[in-house]
Image (spheres, grey):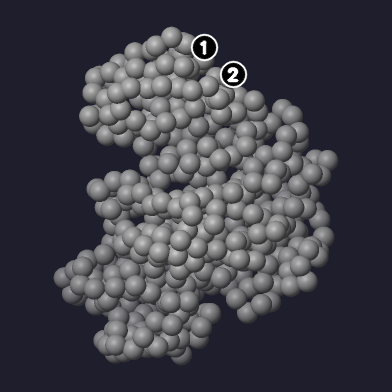
Amino acid sequence: MKKCFYTLMLVCTLFTVRAQELVSSTFLQSIAVSELPAEFAFFARYGIDLYKVLYTTPDIEGRTDTASGLLILPQLEDDLAIPFIVVQHGTVDGPNDVPSNLRGGWELAGVFGAMGYAAISPDMLGLGESRGFHPYVHAATEASAAIDMMYAMQELDNMDDGFALNDQVFVTGYSQGGHAAQALHRELQANHADVFPVTAAAHLSGPYSISEAMFDLIIGDQPYGTVAYAPYTMMAYNEVYGLYDDLEEYVKQPYADMCKRFYRGEVGLFELNGQLIDTLIAREGASITRLFLQDSLIENATHNENHPLRVALRDNDTYDWTPQSPTRIFYCEGDDQVPFRNSIIADSVMRANGAPNFSSTNLSETANHGECVLPALTNTIFFMNALARPVTSTRQPYAAPVQYWPNPAQEQMFIQGLPEGGQLSILDLNGQLQKTWVTQSDVMRLNLAGLSSGMYILSMESAAGYWTQKVIKR
């Protein structure tokens, strides 16, 4: 893939209501497949080229703003059409902690780029090159900033020095990115399906139920390790909805002044969180969010569903619709930042709405928010790769029948029907390689001794295609 710098001033006219414009795409660096981080190792097939993209998109007041994001392309030998994936990033520390600066969790998009996808990760409004305060967990702009970057990417697709996309579109994201992915998926299906029909989506550990699960956490009595999320959301929604004249109407002193310093960009989110927790413990004895909120806010918002804050929270719930494409929600019950109740609520509503190819999976009863990332990503990769059209012949699904038994297994398992000379691997749900074998067409005996009890992924790669299956070790 040729490294290049695009400076284009092309206004898209696909829709009269859309006026986004690709401003530039600047090459950042190449990373060889051998240089990718260790957690990429099993999934990576290609080196990647990274680009910073600038494009225009409306801000929260409808004025044209210049936003930024990261584009990752696999280093392909041939001009092949590749699938397109949008990876929405999670909560970041501040405007510079973003994917286009190779921060802010850009590695999630990197995994997909290294597997042969054209991956984009928008920085979102108020972050990166975009002006203003970030409208945190604001569903409408999480979606619009991503969609406008998707349209901007069409200006690079099929150019002589660019890349070619097939017609497959995938959507995913973790934490805030899970909320943003669900908002994006909903908007694409409702208003852009003729241009970007979603092939599949995976929403990972996101706060989909802002008005219920997250509100109950804010007004509850349990200690919380990321109390800064509450004032961040309130300040963001004030930018959009005009909730108050002064933050002190919602937040007590001295906490309000701490939050205002973050609003002015004088401290990062994680520093603010530490200050709030330290002060809460010193003054109140526990890091309970409600203790720094005004008593009048809690009283009024709890008993009045039409309180401006409650209305704003409901406006940013993302789950009450019916996804038509294959959709998965992955979460961990032990999540200490985003209560798993968010996923339970989304699951129950989407099922009740009649979503045709939908499921949610609790990946761990004990993994916390950080520990849930790898199993969520691993499950997303296997889910999406089963649907993505291959970039090369080696990514064709293996067509011959494969038998494996017993499942669940104890110390050994047998498998038959694989092609000669391939690689068969067993991975845990964190994507960590456990054992490998060279395949043969006869019955193979797989020694599972030493593996802990639990679920694993059997994965086979060969010139004849790929094959994956979940198995259980007792």
Identify the element where label 2 is drawn. loop
Residue at (62%, 49%) from the top-left corner? 169
In the image, 420 versus 293, the foreground residue is 420
Residue, disc 2: 463
Residue at (30%, 16%) from the top-left corner? 447
Mark 1 to mark 2 CA distance (whole Å): 9 Å
What x and y, as percent, mark residue 32? 60, 30
Q: Is residue 444 above or below residue 43?
A: above
Q: Residues within 10 Å of mark 2 (few under 14, many from 20)?
A: some
Q: Which mark is residue 421?
A: 1
Asked whether, in this view, residue 288 is left or right of residue 419, the answer is left
Asked whether, in this view, residue 362 is left or right of residue 160, the answer is left
Q: Are marks 1 and 2 in contact (CB under 8 Å)?
A: yes
Residue at (41%, 60%) from the top-left corner? 351
In the displayed orientation, state which residue is furthest to the left: 285
Identify the element where label 1 is drawn. loop
In the rendered structure, which amino acid carries the disc numbered 2? Ala
What x and y, as percent, mark residue 397? 56, 29
Q: Answer yes or no: is residue 272 visible.
A: no
Q: Residue 269 occupies which quadrant of the picture?
A: bottom left
Q: Answer yes or no: is residue 356 visible.
A: yes
Residue at (51%, 11%) from the top-left corner? 420
Quadrant for the N terminus in the image: top right
Asked whether, in this view, residue 385 is left or right of residue 29, the answer is left
In the rendered structure, which amino acid carries the disc numbered 1? Gly
